[in-house]
Image (spheres, rainbow, N blue to C red):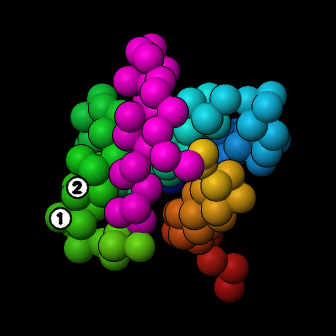
Amino acid sequence: MADYDEARQLLAAAFKDWRALKGMADPEVFADEVFGFHAQQAVEKALKSWLTLLGVEYPRTHDLSLLLNMLKGQGQAVEPFYGLIEFNPYAVQYRYGAFDEVGAPLDRSAVVNRVTELLRTVEAMVTPKRQ
């Protein structure tokens, strides 16, 4: 059974991380690992909100691929969001371990847009339809 209150709370927390992302546009002020952590957190909380709406219990995990696969197992259209798995290492590995800057820096605008798409998708499910 869906728990809309819990789903709304999780989504509200996801939007807090999303707002932090929007404020971290300057890589000279906020390192990629800090920005990436908030991207991962916003995605994780949104996915857990989605699972909650479906009445699915989720494990205590930061693993975005596990959460996405749980949603897919429920018949949900999560394919557009599989690219967000790239933020898995920001949850723990880059948060507490060495961050080796490899490749290009994060495209912060693109990340915000991708996270926004997920949050808006879940928000549409959480928000009651007006008659």
State the image quarter where residue 21 is shown: top right
- Per the rendered image, the range of residues in magenta is 81-104
* Residue annotated with mark 1: 73
The Cα atoms of the two marked residues, 2 and 1, are separated by 5 Å
In the rendered structure, the answer to whether residue 54 lies left or right of residue 107 reads left
For the view shown, which residue lies furthest in the bottom direction?
131
| Residue picked out by circle 2 | 70
Q: Is residue 26 above or below residue 95?
A: below
In the rendered structure, the answer to whether residue 108 lies left or right of residue 28 reads left
Which is more toward the observer, 31 or 62? 31
Quarter of the image where the C terminus is located: bottom right
Residue 124 image position (x, y, % from top left): 59, 71
- Name the residue located 35 percent from the left edge and 63 percent from the top edge: 82
Main secondary structure of the magenta stretch:
helix
Say which quadrant the N terminus sits in: bottom left
**Residue neighbourhood size for the residue with mark 2, other residues' Cα within 10 Å, grouped as few (<14), some (14–19), many (≥20):** some
Q: Residue at x 60, y 45 (%)?
A: 105
Give the image quarter of residue 58. Answer: top left
User: Does residue 59 belong to the magenta stretch?
Assistant: no
Type of amino acid under label 1: Gly
At 69% from the left and 79% from the top, the residue drawn is 130
Q: Is residue 97 above or below residue 101?
A: above
96 vs 10, left or right, is left
Spot occupied by residue 12 in the image (x, y as percentages of width and height): 65, 44
- Verify whether residue 100 appears in magenta: yes
Residue pictured at 17% horizontal, 64% vertical:
73
Label 1 crowd bin: few (<14), some (14–19), many (20+), radius 10 Å? few
The picture places residue 119, in percent across and down from the top left corner, at 58, 59
Residue 41 rendering spot, x and y as whole percentages: 52, 37
Q: Amino acid at mark 2?
A: Met
Q: Relative to the observer, which residue lies in front, 65 or 51?
A: 65
